[in-house]
Every structure is written in C-alpha cells, then in structure tokens.
Image (cartoon, coloured by chain):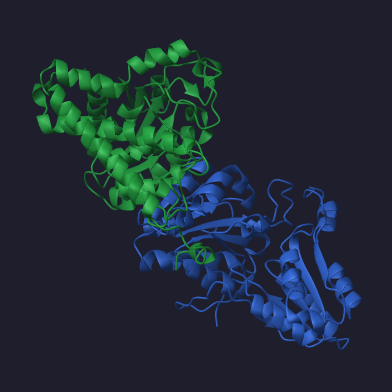
Chain colours: A green, B blue
Amino acid sequence: MATKNKKYDRDFLLGLMEKLMLVRKFEEKIQWLFAQGFVYGTTHLGIGEEATGVGTTAALKKDDYMLATHRGHGQAIGKGVNINDMMAEMLAREPGVNRGKGGSMHIADIQNGILGANGILGANAPLACGAALTIKMKNIPDRVSVAFFGDGASNEGAVHEAMNLASVWNLPVLFVLTENKYGMSTPLDKVVKEKDFNKRAAAYGMKSLEVDGNDVLAVYEAVSKARKYAVEGNGPVLIIEHTYRTSGHSKSDGNLYRTKEEIAEWKEKNPTKRFGDYLLSNGIITEAELKEIDERVQKKIDDAVEYAKSCPQPSVDDLEKSVYAE
Amino acid sequence: MREITYAEAVREAMSEEMRRDENVFFMGEDIGVYCGAFGVSKGMVQEFGEKRVIDTPISETAFVGAGIGAAVTGMRPIVELMFSDFMAVCYDQIINQAAKMHFMFAGKVKVPMVIRTAAGGGTGAAAQHSQSLEQMYTHVPGLKVVVPSTPYDAKGLLKSAIRDDNCVMFLEQKKLYRTKGEVPEEDYVIPLGKADIKREGKDVSVITYGRMVQMSLDVAEKLEKEGVSVEVLDLRTLSPLDTDAIIKTAKKTGKVVVVHESVKFAGFGGEVVSTIMESDAFFTLDAPVKRVGALYCPVPFNPTLEAAVFPSADRIETAIREVL
C-alpha cells in the first residue's frame, strides 16, 4: 500500500473499505439480477476496478463535477449517489435517478456533482472542460471537474482535443485514465504504439501522475495531489490508474480474448480483497469487524433490490413533454 | 427606422444579451480580433474582453462539448461554428450530448446554449462550405432549429434563442450577411416556433425559410403584376414548427409550393407537405403540392453549375405556375 496508515484516520480507512465493498457487491448483484432477467438492456461491469472509482472520488468534494463512463457504477457510487435510487434506475423504475430514462450507462445525480455517465467513449472529456470553464469564469473556489475514460477511449479525438483545450486554457480538469488492459476485447498492444500515457500529457504541456489503480490509497493520494494542483490554478492533470476488469465487457462477452489463468491471477489482486488484507495485517481492523461491514453492505444492497422491485414503472404519458426544458 | 445588415443584427443581439446577462459568453474560431470569417463579431472582443469573447483552438468537438459542459453548469454559451458544414466534425456532441441530456437525465439538467453558424451557398465556397443541413437537426428530438431570413428576424430570434433553456441551432444565411433591413434599436424578441407571413396573398402559398424568402418575395412581386396574388409564409423556426400557420395558409389559398435551399430529396419540405396532407387542409387543396429544392448532388464550385443546383426565381415561378 502506498502509505503507512498513521496519517489516516481509522474511520476514513473503514469508510474506504465500505465503499469498495458497496461497489463490488452492487456490481455482483447486478450481474446476478441480469442473469435472472431482472435487468433490461445491457450493463458494463467494472468488477476488479473498484479502487479507481472509489479512490478517485474519495479525493473529490461533493460539489466537484464528475463526468463518468459507461462503466461508471463505481464512479457514481463513490461520488455519493443514493444506492436505492441507483438500483431503481438499474431496474428501470420511476423513482430511479434518471426516472427510468437513462439506465446503467447514463447515471446522473446533479446534487452530488455527477453530470452524467456517457455511452459515447471519450465524449465526456470536452464536457468536463466546459464544466471547468464555468468554474473558471465564475471564479468558484476549491472545485474541479473530472472526466473518467479508459485506455480504449484514450484514442478518441475528443479526448485529445479536450486535453489540449484544458491545457491551453489552464482549466481545473482531472483526466482520469483507467487503464484496464483491454478496449472491450482489444488489447492495448494492438491499438497504441507508445504505451506510456505520461507522454500524451507531456505533449499537451500537462502534468501527469501514474498510479497502481488497484491500490485504493495510492489512487486517493494521487488524485488528492492532482486536485490540489488544479484548484491552485496550475491547470489540468492526467492521472493514469492501472487496473484490470475481471468481469466481462458486457453481457455479450465470452472472454475469448484472454485466458482463464490471466483472469484468475487478477482476481487474486483485486483491490477490495487487497485493501481488506491490508487493514487486517496492519491491525487496523479485526476479522469480526470486516465481517460486520460485509454484512451491513450486503443488507444495504439486498434492501435496495427489494426497494427497486417494489417501485412503479414510469408513465409513458410524459415522453414527448420531457424533451425540452421549459 | 434605421437600417442595419443581417450580420450587424446578429452582433447586436449577442452584444445586448451579453450586456444583460453576465452568464452569456461567446466562443468560436477567430471570433476575436479577426471578427469571425464574416465579420459578425466586429468590436465584440474590444467591448467584452477575451474572457467572454473566446478564440478557440480548431477543435470543434472540444469547444462545442465545452459549451455544453458550461451550459449544464450554469453558463449560457453562444458557440460559433465558422461554417455549418463543420457541424459534421462535432456531430456527436450535438446529437448524442446536447440534444439528449435533458431527457436522458430526467430533466435534472438543461442545456441553454446557442450554436450559431453560417449556412447555405451561393458564394462559390464549393461542396464543404455551402450546405444547408437543417433537416439533420430537425430530426433529432431535443434540438431547436432556427433559420432567420431578415435582419429584423435575426436579432429578435437570436435574443430568444440565447434566453431559451435548450440547445438552439441558429443557422444564419451567409449569403444574407450583407443584406440590409429595418431593425429597432431597442430590445425585442421574436418567439421561437412562430412563422411569419412575409406577404399576404390569396391565390397561392409559398412556404419557405432562410435565403429563399427574399427570392420568393421577388417572384411574388413579379406575379402580382400579372394579377396573381402570392402569399409567402416564412417558417423562421423549423423546430418547434408552427404547423398551425402552415395549415392556415394552405387552407386559405388551396395551392402550395414549398421552397428551400437544401437538397429537395428527404429535405425539410417533406415535413411541411406532410403537415398539410395529414390535416383537413388536404380537402381544400386544388392542386398537388410542389416542392422546390436543391438538386441531388454536392454543391459544385463553377458558378454556372452552382447556380443550377440551387432553387432560382425562375424555378420558383415555374412551380407556382404549375399549381395555379
């Protein structure tokens, strides 16, 4: 782990543990619900990547703007979306965060700074620049705008344009690149010649940080540092978080592009188990306490599912009336 | 009343709104000291400074996206795309982001933004700088689409567009930038979604918008001398569409010609005709409705070829005579 626990409050560390478990159990529950036919459409799970969403958002403030990705459950939960409302959205119900109009790929929660998850890869990077432009034009103190994207989306022109724009306009944007080894099925080797993403930041005159994305404390520390740098008016930062998605890309994934051994190896390195082991081995938490958190989180998820199942379907009456803001 | 150009009317609308509301700002390529490719923003950077009149990198996706991001967080951006053809470069941000956010996020955000751009042809700018692409935007729920035909309308409609809480595609007609017309100095707005009868008539209706309005009025003037009374309806806003005005004029004259500069095939005229056919105006028609639009080809460079592609006064007159 990145740092000796001395500098952290125990409650903070336990809070991180709980968030990691919450994200993990939320996604595992969605996987199960999907298999049971309760989840309509598709969903992109990020099992194995939960330290990126949780660690990054732990370093953000409630009012910081965040533009999430299609694989954004962990990002949204980390930023503080209500679990019941999010589960209701996953089941396409009326009280869902998007009133059943968005689903897994478009979770938005403005009260918590979540300006929406995006189904178009890389498209959130320019949007994040705009939110940062608001911060700059209105002189809003102590606020940043964050865009998550993956190594796959890093090759979208939108990301390159946005990085250049943020840099030349000195905008408080954090570009969070979750490098999870594959764009859907295509390995990084096949799509980029230069795998050192720091060089991309350098090309745009931007600061970059690189971190083990399965180490939640290391992610938290890197993003905290980047956030401080950006709010002090020094411009944007690219944060490269190395991780691995042990779940498939989506429901269509047959895992034909990687070996069982590779997945098994990364399951061992999964960030939730790793952080739990860290807390145990450093005497920060006991087995009993860890089990207690586990049970509490499990109940929260189970309750959310029961709540969502009890929620009504949205009305079809207001569809055409909901297109424009009045 | 004083007369100013279409370009000056656009500038006046932007400047007045920027003085009225500090959240309104303006960005685009070379809009500062250069004043934009058509001189629309002359003097604006001097008045409002570089913080509110922002020259952008040549990155349409980035700055249109940034406009959307700023709009959803409390600003009211006016974004200029130098030529409307460049919309194709940033189509995702307009179609998948700006148009959908309000609906997809259950009304939690609004996108109060205007994308101003120079549309249309007749200037020798060839295939990639002469298109009229309005029908590509009217087809996307969530966008509003405005095409002003006079300096008076340009000012009043743009002020409404800037005050609107949705993404408005404001398609200025580059061929009209230097045309003059009466424009009040005081503040006024023209509501979006209201068509305007530019000329009353009783024998035949020409339903049109944009650059074709003046051409249709010229034809109407000519035919008046022969005793043919032509009504010219300027749609002004294509989305939302003033269907009542379309049906009303169709019922009034029973003979309709729809004219637009964009390609006739699958153009917006099809929507106008369908509006008539689906209404009880259908029973009052005395002749099949005619459409006049551009030929089905990219806009060519050669002036003779270019002129052959776009609707002309002659083609409008011929169509009118066919329905009479």
Check the image and name the residue furthest to the top.
A261
Residue A9 x/y as whole percent: 10, 30
In the picture, measured across the screen, residue A146 lies left or right of residue A127, that is: left
> Considering depth in this image, is A185 or A308 the residue closer to the camera?
A308
Residue A293 x/y as whole percent: 19, 32
- Vertical placement of B112 versus A46: above or below? below
Q: Please report the residue visible at 67 percent of the width from the left and 67 percent of the height from the top.
A: B210
Q: Quadrant of residue A128?
A: top left
Q: Please report the residue visible at 44 percent of the width from the left and 29 percent of the height from the top.
A: A150
Q: Quadrant of residue B264?
A: bottom right
In the picture, measured across the screen, residue A266 lies left or right of residue A3, that is: right
In the picture, measured across the screen, residue B31 lies left or right of residue B82, that is: left
> Considering depth in this image, is B253 or A283 the residue closer to the camera?
A283
Residue B299 x/y as whole percent: 77, 50
> Considering depth in this image, is B84 or A270 the residue closer to the camera?
A270
Q: Please report the residue visible at 36 percent of the width from the left and 18 percent of the height from the top.
A: A267
For the C terminus of chain B, which image quadrant? bottom right
Residue A311 x/y as whole percent: 38, 55
- Vertical placement of A289 versus B293: above or below? above
- Vertical placement of B14 versus A257: above or below? below
For the N terminus of chain B, which image quadrant? bottom right
- Vertical placement of B219 versus A250: above or below? below
Would residue A170 be visible to someone looking at this image?
no
Q: Please report the residue visible at 58 percent of the width from the left and 56 percent of the height from the top.
A: B117
Would residue B66 be visible to someone looking at this image?
yes
- Count of marks overlaid on the render: 0
In the picture, measured across the screen, residue B250 lies left or right of residue A28, that is: right
